[in-house]
């Protein structure tokens, strides 16, 4: 009887374990971007959306940047991250600034256009990139896509960092602080428009937006993902005309081997709550699942691909 009781107890325990739902807690490490850009508030919104709706996950947001985020996903140090199309493609191909090919990086979906902008103090006498020679400029640390684009715009003008006095700042906010105090005359950034950091500078100093039209074709020779787009009129106070800036695509990336159902749910929740994201960044006002599914040269995660197929069929 004692043995029978023991067997029955084991059987009951086994049946209870099979019936219990599997809800192991998982922390998703979400690499974002520098303070003053759009990625930080969007990540905060997605964290709230995903944690509220997907059982068993916690989202930990971390600072990051376009190049560093691709490395973070490829190296397994992050679960999800923002990326810039030009940098992600370079990472997968092993092009500079990546020393080798990055693997296990998949697209979740394109979000909106990014604008690389070059802003100078109005009294600096800087009207073109060549005028920056010998001048103090503020830019982001290495590992930020905008820093790589800054190298490229200098290259397109026949220059390099050795021709300017570069100051690498941890955020756009810090870069604006240097211009406001007169310690720098130019800063570069890559984010949505209007950028809050540029608006902050315009409230404190007279500024000029450098027209990058003369450099577009040379930039495209460096990376064909670059485009030249006219900055819409009145995007910023003090803006004169519609100066051309450099654009590329912001998107979300994850590990290619991440659970398909989990990624499907993350993407579905993003688009179910897209109005929340549009309230944070107006650049997403024209974004749809169809635009998100566009081929940007980065393989689509199977979970995301399933969502976009279903969305297209509706």
Image (cartoon, rainbow, N blue to C red):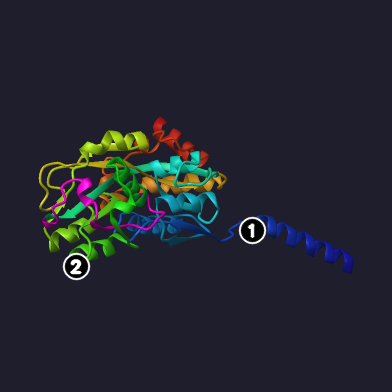
Residue at x 74%, y 59% (from the top left corner): 14
Pick whichever of labels 1 and 2 is earlier in the sequence: 1
Left or right: residue 135 versus residue 265 is left
In front here: 68 or 62?
68
Residue reaching furthest top?
Answer: 313
Tell me where the magenta segment starts and ends, as one range.
Answer: 123-145
Residue 105, compared with residue 168, is above or below; it is: above
Q: Position of residue 271 (x, y in %)?
A: 37, 45
Q: Secondary structure at mark 2?
A: loop
Residue at x 52%, y 48% (from the top left corner): 262
Q: Which residue is mark 2?
A: 181
The answer to whether residue 72 shows anywhere in this view is: yes
Q: Residue 128 in magenta?
A: yes
Residue 233's quadrant in the figure?
top left
Q: Secondary structure at mark 1?
A: loop
Residue at x 50%, y 55% (from the top left corner): 78
Left or right: residue 256 versus residue 244 is right
In front here: 184 or 55?
184
Q: Residue 213 in magenta?
A: no
Classify mark 2: residues with Cα within 10 Å, few (<14), some (14-19) or many (20+): few
Q: Position of residue 58 (x, y in %)?
A: 49, 61
């Amino acid at each position: 009887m004692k043995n029978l009781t023991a067997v029955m107890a084991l059987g009951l325990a086994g049946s209870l374990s099979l019936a219990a739902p599997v809800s192991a807690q998982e922390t998703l490490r979400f690499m974002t971007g520098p303070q003053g850009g759009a990625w930080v508030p969007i990540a905060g919104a997605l964290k709230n959306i995903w944690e509220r709706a997907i059982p068993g996950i916690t989202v930990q947001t971390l600072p990051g940047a376009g190049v560093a985020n691709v490395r973070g996903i490829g190296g397994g140090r992050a679960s999800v991250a923002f990326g810039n199309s030009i940098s992600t493609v370079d990472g997968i191909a092993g092009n500079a600034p990546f020393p080798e090919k990055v693997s296990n990086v998949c697209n979740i979906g394109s979000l909106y256009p990014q604008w690389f902008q070059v802003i100078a103090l109005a009294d600096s006498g800087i009207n073109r990139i060549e005028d920056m020679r010998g001048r103090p400029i503020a830019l982001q640390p290495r590992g930020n896509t905008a820093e790589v684009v800054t190298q490229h715009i200098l290259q397109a003008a026949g220059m390099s960092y050795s021709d300017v006095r570069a100051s690498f700042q941890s955020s756009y906010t810090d870069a604006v602080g240097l211009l406001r105090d007169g310690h720098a005359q130019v800063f570069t950034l890559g984010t949505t428009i209007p950028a809050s950091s540029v608006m902050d500078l315009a409230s404190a100093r007279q500024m000029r937006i450098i027209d990058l039209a003369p450099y577009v074709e040379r930039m495209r020779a460096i990376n064909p993902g670059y485009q030249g787009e006219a900055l819409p009129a009145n995007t910023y106070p003090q803006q004169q005309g519609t100066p051309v800036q450099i654009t590329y695509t912001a998107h979300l990336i994850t590990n290619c081997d991440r659970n398909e159902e989990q990624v499907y749910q993350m993407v579905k929740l993003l688009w179910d709550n897209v109005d929340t994201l549009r309230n944070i960044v107006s650049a997403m006002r024209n974004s749809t699942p169809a635009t998100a599914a566009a081929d940007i040269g980065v393989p689509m995660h199977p979970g995301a691909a399933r969502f976009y197929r279903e969305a297209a069929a509706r």
